[in-house]
Image (cartoon, grey):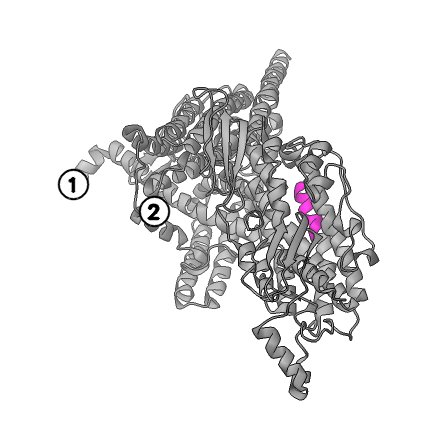
Amino acid sequence: MISFLTSNAYWIIWLVKIALLLFIVLTVNAYLTWFERKVVAHMQSRWGPHRVGPHGLLQPLADGAKFLLKEDPTPAGVDKFTYFLAPLMALALALTSIAIIPFGPEPLHIFGQTITLGIADLNIGILALFAITALSVYGVALAGWSSNSKYPLLGGLRSSAQMISYELALTMSVVGVLLMAGSFNLRDIIGAQSQHPERGLLGWNLWPQILGFICFFVAAVAETNRVPFDLPEAESELVAGFHTEYASFKFAMFFIAEYTSMITVSCLCTIMFFGGWLSPFPASWTFTHYLPSAILIPLGLWVIWDGLRYETVFGKLVLPGIGTVMLALGAALIAFPAVNEFIQGPFWLLGKILVFLFVYVWMRGTLPRFRYDQLMSFGWKLLLPVSIANVILTAFVLLWRGAQ
Amino acid sequence: MTTVETAAGATKTMVLNMGPQHPSTHGVLRVLLELDGETVVSAIPDLGYLHTGIEKSCEDKTYSQAITLTDRMDYLNPLGNNLVYCLAVEKLLGLEIPKRAQYVRVMMVELQRISSHLVWLGTHAIDMGAMSVFLYCFREREEILKIFELFAGQRMMTSYIRIGGLALEPPAGWRAVVDRLLKMMPSRIDEYESLLTGNRIWMGRLKGVGYISPEDAVALSMTGPTLRAAGIPYDNRKVFPYSSYDEFEFDVPTRTESDCFARYLVRVLEMRESLKIVRQAMNKITEDGPFKAEAPGIIPPAREKMKTEMEALIYHFKIFTEGFSPAPGEVFVTVESPRGELGCFVASDGSPKPLRVHFRSPSYINLQALPKLTTGQLISDVVACIGTIDIVLGDVDR
């Protein structure tokens, strides 16, 4: 048994990593819906989900169960094959793109094996990622077309046009970063930002590429069909857009795909412009390494306290349990400095991703929606020229520096 | 069932059936859109999905009973509907209403106008994708509905305004509640404006969309904020003052652009003007005084009188069993509802039940402009236009 494991370690590690990442991404997806509903609710002076489980924490599970158990009617006259293919495609492509994201700098050494954090470490990482996200337009377009209904058709057409237009600006806006790093590999891009560890967050690509970042973020929001660019599913115009005719788990697939691409885009933003797993503090400030503990321990204490005064017995049991785990984790990080060092990279990466996800939700609570023609002219007449100008500017500055 | 022949040939355009079940037709309006891509070639509103037969039902009720039906007509303006119907019947009877009751009526109707505009702003914002404004507006509307509940015991279908005055004496402690609302509202309206008025996306969605020339607006007999946004300061409260509106100081906000953005601004300004009127009315209402007219046989007598006077008891019995019979004749009265000119026609044949009741509802008449507003625009603009006409389907189909 042991010999089988060690001789096939490469494949087993690989499969376990994929399974683990899928599990994590889908769980994060589910809790992202909870997070979004809760944050938007509090922005709108509401409570948000608070019935299923303490603070509505089991709401995602209830939603998942509902999606699985709902009747799944297929409308008359649909193109069966494409109708089934579209949600599968959307979900598969969205999940594939996550595979290229690296989650930490140091490989994990365990049982004599070296395990890198991240599934595929491609030397054309960013290109592959854009190729996959570019394909995801098929999911939406096919869903709109195969549903044999007018609202999905309009939604599908809108989103094909939108995604293709913004794809250009999205790609052009990162060219500056690629020029600066001299590589397509996501690890190298982060590495290029860590050349001056003493500068902390001033070494990030954000500052020289501020124009590129703005273009990238706007284009990325449009690419993921989120507010204010959520025209393909503009509920006040197109009912639900391309997924109007989808129900039950096929709808859930589109839903998961959308949230997964939100996570991917947040990862990309973090890696390209915000230094990925690099700490925002100068490297000499070693005391900031205790920040994970400094967050976990008070948070754990608060959750315990909150749980003790919760109304239901379930909450009184579960919340202090979660709090204790947090507290223990925080304490363990102080007790084992090696683990603490290892956790720094993923901690900052996840922290930054969370900030971006919050910005997504924040925008949803604030902004109205663009109109279709305004969206197109915004993409083609403003975003694309600005991102091209950014490329030219970056290229000139790099040449000038090289000549000196 | 309305069907359309496509004007530009069957192959080039597509007919999209918007409604009757659609998130942004504000009820059950059906609009047949002929589309070339996303551009509207023609738009035909199809009505009647919410026909309630309220006008016809009124003919089978006594004059007092019909008040409860008017509540359910324009469900965002029940007090205004009560008012116009009661004004019509009072004109038929030649009743004189005590000043105190008139001021309370003005105050209630203006609060109703604010709450109606809040619902309009919220739903219009959510149509445009701005989700939070919707909930902020409903938060403040809730406060106004609480005031109605305090006065009438009902939040929406109040039936508070009755023939000859009011249903009940204003409750104890109402001044503090209304005062709190008046102090809160200006900053809350600023909050909505800070989210919308200067927002580039909001302006882009509304400016230049749904233009109608002042001449066309008059020709289609549009009224209310939609007409005033075209630069015509026509307001029934100023032109034909009713219920002592001539004693109040307020402006009639107008704009000249006549697009969706102008209509939005006019309504926001109207909310601020209404706050002024409520403040003035609050100061005019005295602590003591009659809240309904004295008219034996028409207005129910006070409870105390019934216990001591035989005539009062007989009148009470007769009013609630048989009703009262105005002299034969017909009247037409108009008021300014949040949506425009709301008219009420009542004809009497001398029996205790009206011969005919008809309402000139602003939603129905303003809706005529929809094809003119939307032709040549995009689907998203149709939503903006339906929103800024501010239709209430209960008011369209009576």
Q: Chain of mark 1?
A: A
Q: Amino acid at mark 2?
A: Phe
Residue for point 59% across, 35% down:
B370
Residue sitting nearer the eye, A179 or A194: A179
Q: Amino acid at mark 1?
A: Met
The quadrant of the picture occupied by the N terminus of chain A is top left
Q: Mark 2 Cα within 10 Å, few/some/many (few <14, many 20+)?
A: some
**Magenta segment: does it hold B344?**
no
Which callout, 1 or 2, points at the residue further toward the start of the chain?
1
Q: Chain of mark 2?
A: A
| Residue identifier under label 2 | A67
Most prominent secondary structure in the magenta stretch?
Answer: helix
Residue sitting nearer the eye, A212 or A337: A212
Report whether residue A201 is seen.
yes
A67 vs B60: above or below: above
The residue tagged with tag 1: helix, strand or loop? loop
**Magenta segment: does it hold B192?**
yes
Left/right placement of residue B173 relative to residue A321 reads right
Query: Which labelled disc corresponds to residue A1?
Result: 1
Quadrant of res B130 = top right
| Region of the chain picked out in magenta, as a range | B188-196
Provide residue B313's location: percent of width, then percent of height. Answer: 63, 83
Q: Mark 1 Cα within 10 Å, few/some/many (few <14, many 20+)?
A: few
Query: Which labelled disc corresponds to residue A170?
Result: none
A194 vs B193: above or below: above
Left/right placement of residue B271 relative to residue B51 reads right
